[in-house]
Image (cartoon, coloured by chain):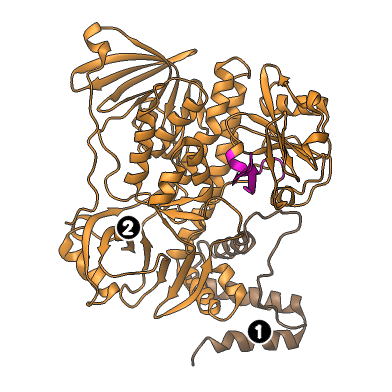
Amino acid sequence: MLKTYTYPKYEYRTPPEIAAGKTLKVPVVIVGAGPVGLGMALDLDLQGIPVLLLDEDDTVSIGSRGVCYAKRALEILDRYGVGEAVCAKGVSWNVGRTFFRESEVYNFNLVPEPDHHRPGMVNLQQYYLEEYLVTRAAARPGIDLRWKNKVVSVTQAATGVSLTVETPDGLYAVEADWLITADGARSPIRRMLGLEVEGKIFMDRFLIADVVMKADFPAERWFWFDPPFHPNQSVLLHKQTDSVFRIDFQLGWDADPEEEKKPENVIPRIKAMLGDQREFELEWVSVYTFQCRRMGRFNHGRVLFVGDAAHQVSPFGARGANSGLQDADNLGWKLKLVMDGKAPERLLDSYSEERVYAADENLMNSTRSTDFITPKSRASRTFRNAALSLAKDHAFGRSLVNSGRLSVPSFLVDSSLNTPDEDPFAGRMLPGAPMDDAPVEKDGAPGWLLQSTGNRFQLMVFVDDPATADISALSQLDVGGIAVEPLLISRVAASACALPCVHDVRGIAAKRYDAKPGSVYLIRPDQHVAARWRSFDAAKLRAAVARATCQQ
Amino acid sequence: MALNLNPNLSEAGKRYFSAYSPGDDFYELLIGAHLDLSDEQSELLNARLILLLANHIGDIATLREALAVAREGVQA
């Protein structure tokens, strides 16, 4: 098979604790250096927390696996310092085409509106994402990343976790105040702790192939229902980087995975799809089944679960790695406040509450897509085919066709951390919303609103002119040791401003946040809206910060 | 009342953050209603549902139009 990518082999180093016969004591250990574990390490590093990151392997993911990285995940990766690399290497796409039998029934364009830094979706093989994250993590002195370090036992006490780690040179012990489990869908740690994960297995198998195509093919997502070259099943085609295309064939439950994986069986399927004249080579083939399930809660005392270890969805909609990165986004700042004694451990219950809510939304959407794509009864198949046959001519039919609802972040509108609105606002930046981006200028240079936010609590203050802002009221905002940094969003360019300030050159930020001069937004470190008012009131701000950090 | 062929589903009191959500909510209810039914029972359920909805719509001109659009996509 062809190789467009050389897998890095990361160096294993003998842990010094083995020769010294010492127990390694650390504040936080993360198990699993996949996209979510690595993202988690970088998030905690931004918070100033030293991290021990263990992985039993010594390379990145084999095969493309996760393919689509959605806008919110890209914005989080921007915070982690790898968003630019992912977007530069990845294939940006907006057009999706849906085919039913012989013909195209409709296409969609993902671009919802202009003036956002990141696109709706970027396709990139998972190994590139992991490589960029590893490179970033390796450059951070606060992250101790150890390859070929496998956790073989774990016990939890009231104030910490004890691990035994196996390496090529033997065993050593780790004691950590906190354990973050990012060891994937099969999660050995979850099993060692005897914790349950509930849901259902879907009785279907999918063949996935990475195919290197010589000819040009558009950067679009193509989805077939019941195509002539693969009757009664579905097929999905995605363009990735390096001319590698990812093709998923639905096989049905009775297919033999070992037989289906053989090139002599895969190649005719792809030829039937592409036609004989198109040249291609196989790079990687796998057969998968999937489950839709989640743990009852994602925090268990000093053990926190993120990514697939906590929740697993069907692949339709790209909601796996994307939601895992949002777990890290949600957890990092909360753990920091708890570790610093600035918030009670209850704040971690809100991590579980908010991410369980998001996981349920992801499970619901990916299960609905699965049920549409792979109908389980004659009635269900008839309705699906009826929707597809109406889609070609009628808009309402298109809205019912579900070939995957692509990952979007949850609006955490029911979160207990939100302060309910008391002033009227239009638009969708309500408490619990993930922030909308907007083009702004900072010190005269063009940039983006999201680049000026994140990692700490901030108060966005919309002003006509920064000169009119009440500097003394806004500087040194502090609620129980938690600093709230002001960020002026100004309608006019600021010459000399005593407070951090961006210039809302075209008024897009004010429009998206339905802001008038004087409107203020309390923003969480994970770029979610916590509270908002039409005017600044120090007492209300204190109460909202206390609420967003479980101090009341 | 002309037949509405644009997306038209919603539920009072519910706020949607994705355009596809109300349609998907309905579709899940629809497929769920057929759970555990045989093919014949499903046909009967569909027929009862059409009669109920037709009576609710009431306007026969609209129903005539819907019947024509439905029939367009089905070859005898």
Counting from the top left corner in percent of width and height, residue A493 is at 72, 43
Chain drawn brown in the picture: B
Residue A434 visible in this rendered orientation of the protein: no
Counting from the top left corner in percent of width and height, residue A408 is at 55, 51
Q: Spot the residue most to the bottom.
A: B76
Q: Would you name the residue on which mark 1 appears?
A: B66
Chain drawn orange in the picture: A
Compared to residue A170, the image places residue A112 above or below, namely below
Reply yes or no: does residue A436 show up in magenta.
Answer: yes
Subunit under mark 2: A
Counting from the top left corner in percent of width and height, residue B35 is at 52, 61
Q: Are marks 2 and 1 in contact (CB under 8 Å)?
A: no
User: Which contiguous range is marked in magenta?
Assistant: A430-451
Compared to residue A259, the image places residue A419 above or below, namely above
* Towards the viewer: A373 or A69: A69
Image quadrant containing the N terminus of chain A: bottom left
* Towards the viewer: A498 or A396: A498
Left or right, residue A513 beside residue A256: right
Q: Tell me which residue sits at (40%, 26%) in the image.
A: A140
The amino acid type of the residue labelled 1 equals Ala
Subunit under mark 1: B
Badge 2 density bin: few <14, some 14–19, many ≥20, Cα 10 Å: some
The amino acid type of the residue labelled 2 equals Arg
Counting from the top left corner in percent of width and height, residue A407 is at 51, 52
Q: Would you name the residue on which mark 2 appears?
A: A205
Compared to residue A386, the image places residue A460 above or below, namely above
Q: Are marks 2 and 1 on the same chain?
A: no
